[in-house]
Image: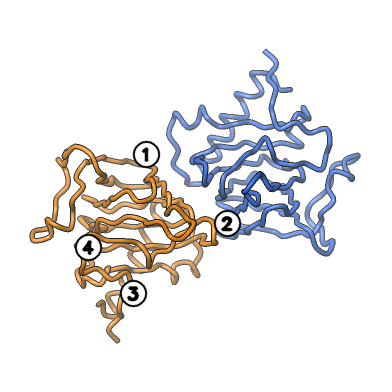
Chain colours: A orange, B blue
Amino acid sequence: MLTRADYSAAQSRAASLIRESGIYITDKEVEMVEVADFGLSRLDMEGAQILTLVATDRIAVKIIVLFPRQTIPEHWHPRVGEDPGKEETVRVVSGTVRFYISGDESMREGFVLAGQEDAYTVRHELILKPGDQITLQPGSKHWFQTGEEAVMYSFSTVARDVLDCFTDPHIERVTRIQE
Amino acid sequence: MLTRADYSAAQSRAASLIRESGIYITDKEVEMVEVADFGLSRLDMEGAQILTLVATDRIAVKIIVLFPRQTIPEHWHPRVGEDPGKEETVRVVSGTVRFYISGDESMREGFVLAGQEDAYTVRHELILKPGDQITLQPGSKHWFQTGEEAVMYSFSTVARDVLDCFTDPHIERVTRIQE
């Protein structure tokens, strides 16, 4: 749950960061920035700001903005019918992103929120800087986090966000706005 | 056919335009810029400079650079086996792009090279500026051109460039370099 004012503030802050990163977006696109609190009501800790540039039934292109120390909760993209699941390449545009995937535990720079240990199970750390990118296969668990703010692209096969699976059972992919 | 010197010069000119457009690319990526003369040996008239950022067996992301008055020849992306053909969204980052698709003849700003009239059959003109984008369905003929230089993204399903179809029968998708 976010207040309308919080939602709007996050939206315009994210749009400014996108523009500062060098990505050109239109004024209309600023209004389309989605603020996602994953139903957890603590946007500054677990959340993301997302601008979808392309969403067809075959591909999706999104710009993801993270505010300082914001974490996108652990999730994966499951098989949906004949679709083996979303394949996603994340490319960092500005800032530094701490990326977590399965593999040997190697978390050094990042952190798991207190009380949320069970919701973050993969802890192999990759530190991605501008121009770095990673391709995630369908079904692979991942989560990411920033120290300072960051802007990145997500290039993927068709996105069906509401069908994404999250480790934290409290998560809802829809952000509710308190009017 | 391009000389090695011409190829390198086009590559570094394209990389500079990409960076001036605000897109961050690494030094290693500069070396990966492809210069395509479509086998026509007149790069400054018909050609393109392309940097592939993502190429999996499901999606592709490319940055396309056009120099002033450069034209990408008319082509389309055919069905390949079970793939209905490449679906492609082009989004302009900098400059103005004249885009031609099928529909009522409406060419006003662009031009067809003298003697190449048969190679450019679709002439419905769209003028795209930064932040504008167009999604092309598989199989639909298209070509594009600039007045001044331009940089754009191509977001698509899997790219199989060598299987693209061109209206001009003289075109070869491989650029030969004269050593």
* Residue placed under numbered mark 4 in the picture: A46
Separation (CA) of disc 2 from disc 1: 24 Å
Tags 2 and 3 both on a single chain: no
Q: Nearer the viewer, mark 3 or mark 4?
A: 4
Instruction: Mark 1 or mark 4: name the one nearer the start of the chain.
Output: 4
Foreground residue, A97 or B42? A97
User: Between marks 1 and 4, how big is the CA–CA gap?
Assistant: 23 Å
Identified by mark 4, the residue type is Glu
Q: Up-down: is A39 above or below B42?
A: below
Query: What amino acid type is highlighted by mark number 2?
Result: Pro
User: Secondary structure beneath disc 3?
Assistant: helix
Residue denoted by label 3? A8
- Quarter of the figure that contains the N terminus of chain A: bottom left
- Give A35 or A22, whichever is nearer the viewer: A35
Which quadrant of the structure image shows residue A38?
bottom left
Amino acid type, label 1: Asp
- Disc on res. A132: 1
**Which chain letter matches label 2?**
B
How many numbered callouts?
Answer: 4
Q: Residue at x 42, y 52 (%)?
A: A154
Q: Considering the numbered disc 1 on the image, is that residue within a helix, a strand or a loop? A: loop
Marks 2 and 3, how far apart in space? 25 Å
